[in-house]
Amino acid sequence: MTTEPVRVGIVGLGTVGSGVVRLLIESADHITRHTGRPIVVERAVCRDVGRDRGLKLPAERISADIRDIARDPSISVAALLVGGLEPARSMMVELLENGKDVVTANKALLAEHGPELFELARSRGRSIAFEAAVAGGIPIVAAIGECLAANRIESIRGILNGTSNFILSRMEEDGADYAEVLALAQARGYAEADPSMDVDGTDATQKLAILSHLAFGVWVPWAEIPRTGIERIDAALLNYAAELGYRIRLVAVAARTDTADGERLAMRVAPALVKIGTPLAETRRAYNAVSIVGDAVGRMFFHGLGAGQMPTASAVVGDIIDTVVGRTAITFRTTGVLDVESPTAKIAGVDMLERHFLRIRVTDRPGVLSQITGILGSHGISIASVIQHGAEMSEGTDAPVPLVIMTHAAASTAVRGALEAIDRCSTVRGPSDCLSVLDDA
Amino acid sequence: MTTEPVRVGIVGLGTVGSGVVRLLIESADHITRHTGRPIVVERAVCRDVGRDRGLKLPAERISADIRDIARDPSISVAALLVGGLEPARSMMVELLENGKDVVTANKALLAEHGPELFELARSRGRSIAFEAAVAGGIPIVAAIGECLAANRIESIRGILNGTSNFILSRMEEDGADYAEVLALAQARGYAEADPSMDVDGTDATQKLAILSHLAFGVWVPWAEIPRTGIERIDAALLNYAAELGYRIRLVAVAARTDTADGERLAMRVAPALVKIGTPLAETRRAYNAVSIVGDAVGRMFFHGLGAGQMPTASAVVGDIIDTVVGRTAITFRTTGVLDVESPTAKIAGVDMLERHFLRIRVTDRPGVLSQITGILGSHGISIASVIQHGAEMSEGTDAPVPLVIMTHAAASTAVRGALEAIDRCSTVRGPSDCLSVLDDA
């Protein structure tokens, strides 16, 4: 074995970048045993060169110009740990064009520009590793792309955003409302000052697009995936769910689905009711979880920290090791094997047959229930249970009264159609809430 | 990419071997996309050549002599899917000496002869892949050996034997006794006619030895790992545990532990109380689960089918793909990096500081409780709670009455010492039961 060190460059010294430098330096002996060669942080580039991050990295190895890494021939691997689309995209291009293998944690960049960046890397004989881009420390990219390679993946379900899961599980535990818990999460550093990408489902949707590329061989533009955030979830909704034996989680779903036009990929990110006792329901706080069904292996479940400095650094350094020893080059060659053709055409309007949980606020009782159940019936939706709750707040005698309805399995388009008709009723104070129910999550 | 097929040999056409042949043939297109080359079953060898297994494998490709694979120069990879030590060991040697890369699901063989077989493979420039040997379809070998390579592993806890987990979870759900459920498991094919290796902890211990090799770089002779089976678990014990908020699971544990003599590896396989709601407690039926703590990644949890034809075949074929594309050769080179020196010396008498659950059957009440608590106190064990239950069976007026005691955290050797003294009391009908309590399992 050669003992010549491998020199790596770190682009970005934010939370994750600093964690990666720390891990590479503090666990150097351990990592050397895994690679057979020492891994040396030759250079780090960042915007604020002078800031003290408490890193054991000599000041002369920190600079501000990406070209200090890209054009240093002694550096073979670069970790791109800058968020957002630009300048991250240009940096990735600069690194690949200068012959560096790249490791990244930037899910937005891959979800938006994955195909062109992958193509560029392949054309230059380089690789991109991105375990850290999805579910932080959980090795879900390797699991789908390598370990479960013998399987035709049937479905993926995941809790892929730690911030929104933290908010939902705290709301449930404390009986607190959304705004209250969001403020707490921000104070504790679990949520960004602008948490909109987390709570509106964007972040989870981008991660789902990346996992679907690995699992189904399609690049689905993430913005085309139906997406609902957690902003409308309130304490009352969580209580109704709990009464019925469920928790509410923001669940990303991609599943092969038979339709009249043949097999389609059904995808969405939305809050859903997950049965208490199932693994997704037991995923709390900032944890992430992924459940995968493969035709041979059956249902596999993974749970771990999906974000945070050191869990993400664990995945980045794991990828650096894989790249150094040569595993990444092999895997990257076979990543994204096409199983479903013409990807973008395949997800539009794909219906999932599921049970649904509805909350409909009505202003007047006699006759209303029969009107609403009549509309559901005329849309072919059969009802499993109706619970009539008291008014949620003391808003006077004409306060809206919530009807909580569980349907039997029904096509999601039919349920949405029925709800539109229901919300047009003068006795209904809309918009009503509609969540899928996952009994085997 | 070359389209020259890779020819593999399958040794053993039992449940797993037949599943592997089925998967390789039925998912051939899918697998070819992952490898870039078709994988062809060139030959299968088994004892009963004539038996119809319903496989789409021409009869002329099935024979009885391992040399038909070992000495066929067109075959580069062999899957050894025969259980037990011999002739499996000789077959593995024959395959390696003839230059085949080997994939195996045989945990007993690796736990017993791993070091010499690994050494032989290395000396011949060949590899051994063994994802299927531990936890079936769960990619735990890859997770520890590759994905979490950046981490110093602190501990592993796992439910590694599906048969004993099936028995324990059915006993709990049905309130049935051990013998009853074992008979059911045998009737359903979940337990072998001779289930002793499953229920006495041998199988789980062998798997723990293999995982510890990957995680801690030590080869611990499996027979030296303290081991207790599930044979003494009865319905009453499960009920007491449930009253306190716990389930009983057969848990394999390996953890770095600080001792007066420096860091040691604490290991054991034994039934333990795991808190309801934690992932190990929610692992039911024939499922396996592994919880790993890494210094960077924190706690990771994996759950899936640990046995059965297709889940195991999924892991075997995954390994065949990894071997064909070249990932295994790289991984095998770095497997088993030494973190803890002089392995065998390190596990003897290592104490774990844990809470303990005791069931002590006493024949007479007044004064007995004070005698027993006195003995515990004199061994430095402090008590968290005592529950006095009624007699378990109607055995007359002098029937033993169970005392259920939860201790605060105490060294396991101290607890065992105290129990020996307690069991010597004339008022105690021993042997008493002692289980560790895992609150964060």
Image: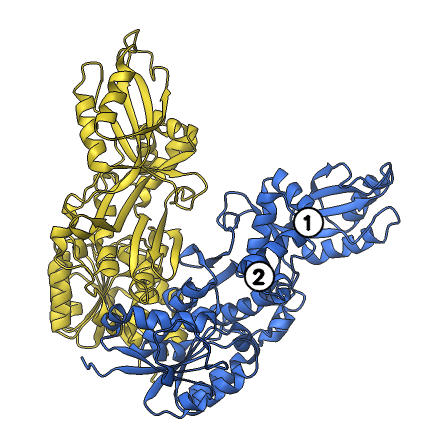
Chain colours: A yellow, B blue
Please provide percent x and percent y for residue A233: 30, 30
**Residue at horizontal 43 percent and vertical 28 percent from the top:** A243
Pick the front one: B136 or A182: B136
Q: Residue at x 68, y 46 (%)?
A: B237
Question: Is the same chain shared between marks 1 and 2?
Answer: yes
Q: Which residue is mark 1?
A: B234
- The residue wearing badge 2 is B191
Give the camera-side residue of A360 and B20. Answer: B20
Residue A210 sits in quarter = bottom left
Q: Residues within 10 Å of mark 1 (few under 14, many from 20)?
A: some
Going from N to C along the chain, the mark reached first, 1 or 2, is 2
Q: For this view, does A347 lie left or right of residue B106?
A: left
Q: Between marks 1 and 2, how big is the CA–CA gap?
A: 18 Å
Secondary structure category for the residue under label 1: loop
Query: Mark 1 — on which chain does it sit?
Result: B
Q: Is residue B361 above or below residue A374?
A: below
